[in-house]
Amino acid sequence: MVIRLLDRHSVLTCICILAAAIAVTMAVNLNRDGGIPASADVASGGAPAASGGAASGSAGQTAPKIAGAADEMRAVWVPYLSLNMSREDDKSKTAFLNKFNRIVGNAKKCGMNTLIVQVRPFGDSLYKSAYFPWSHVVGGTQGVNPGYDPLALMVETCHGAGLKIHAWVNPLRIQVDGTPSILAVGNLYNTWKKDPAKADWVVDFGKGKYFNPAYADVRRRIADGVKEIARNYDVDGIQFDDYFYPTQDAAFDKKAYDSYCAAAKKTGTPLGLLEWRQANVSALVSLVYRETKSVKPSLPFGIAPQANVQNDLSMGADVRSWCSVSGYVDYICPQLYVNFENAVLPYDAAAKTWRGMVTNRNVKLYFGLAVYKAGSDADSGTWKQAGNILASQVEYGRKTPCDGFMFYSCDYLDTDQTKREVQNVVEALKR
């Protein structure tokens, strides 16, 4: 989860009237089981709305009630690499539990109350799934059953330690830079690529493989996978990370976009590629939200986008609508992995921008902070000039205000590099 700050201007003219329609429908009837509206279904020949104003906000667009100290979010991300058993000689349940227990113990020592654990990093799963193969992270090779259920163990361990746990899902990534090195026979990439009617549902691009969110059936499978977690595990939340469309290159989804344009021209003017992609991602997000609520209405679903709003929009993430319109998320956690001295996007400016965007009182705002940069040479060495950057960010965040913080990542809560900063932020969290 690394921020990519680009100095470019990308104006979002509108996501389309469709977004508002989807949001209002879901807000009124969260428990109704249904697919994406035909107007957003490229695969079935429909198309997102060709023109229209920006999505309108739902009722209650006032600043949310900010959490008090007792319920302030204090979470730490646990990426799949921190759980990786593939290089361990001992891949047993006991070995995995020992590794996770160390993470839990250190999180508690640092005053955390929640773990955000990556359970689907590559179109696979660290849990028993009817849709995705076992992850290589626990089985050594994708598709190999580790002989135990890691997510069930992690839920039990967290709750036993008085911590909450959110299941962190990467929605579109299947393989990047040869990781995982082997895709299971039953991996959807392999099964869909063999079927001419479904071959475009997955995309080879650059050094990676990805799900194509332009198709309703793809969005449905991703949403069903999230619903499965909500139904089968006592998690306290579900989170998408910041990776959506991996490129702005039109070649990524040319076939799907051309098909959409051909259909849209019959009734109006097609959306531009960027707006169309935003509509696809928002359709996915809204469906995941609805499916999660159909199982557990009170279970929070959130997203942790990049701090730079223009970057988010460029990768298809319409964060402005998600922050203001009901039916997308329960919380948003921008990754503010910058300090006050950042030349492109200073922390205080970014915090104010996101506070201003979250106008839906039902959407909580958390700030993601970069523990991994503390004491490092990152950002022209500015992180070495002080030992209280993270503590100052917590204090500023509370004044902004926000509902809490998420720290990246668990591996950096106990290192020589970050020791001074972590000690100071722990003290700040106590205040």
Image (spheres, grey):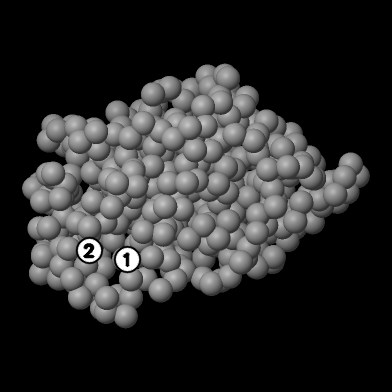
Tally of marks: 2
Res 255 label:
none
Q: On the rendered structure, is 423 left or right of 283?
A: left
Residue reaching furthest front?
A: 399
Residue 81 can be seen in this image: no
Q: From the viewer's perspective, is residue 386 above or below residue 147? A: below
* Residue 284 placement (x, y as % from top left): 57, 41
Distance Cα–Cα, label 2 vs label 1: 8 Å
Is 130 positioned to the left or the right of 196 in the image? left
Write the residue at 58% across / 20% down: 28
Picture quarter with the C terminus: top left
Residue under the point 17% across and 63% down: 388
Disc number at residue 340?
1
Q: Amino acid at mark 2?
A: Ile
Pick the front one: 190 or 367: 367
Of 245 and 200, nearer the camera is 245
What residue sits 58% from the left and 70% below the top? 8
Q: Which residue is mark 2?
A: 389
Q: Are marks 2 and 1 in contact (CB under 8 Å)?
A: yes
Q: Secondary structure at mark 1?
A: loop
Q: Name the kind of residue labelled 1 in the image.
A: Phe
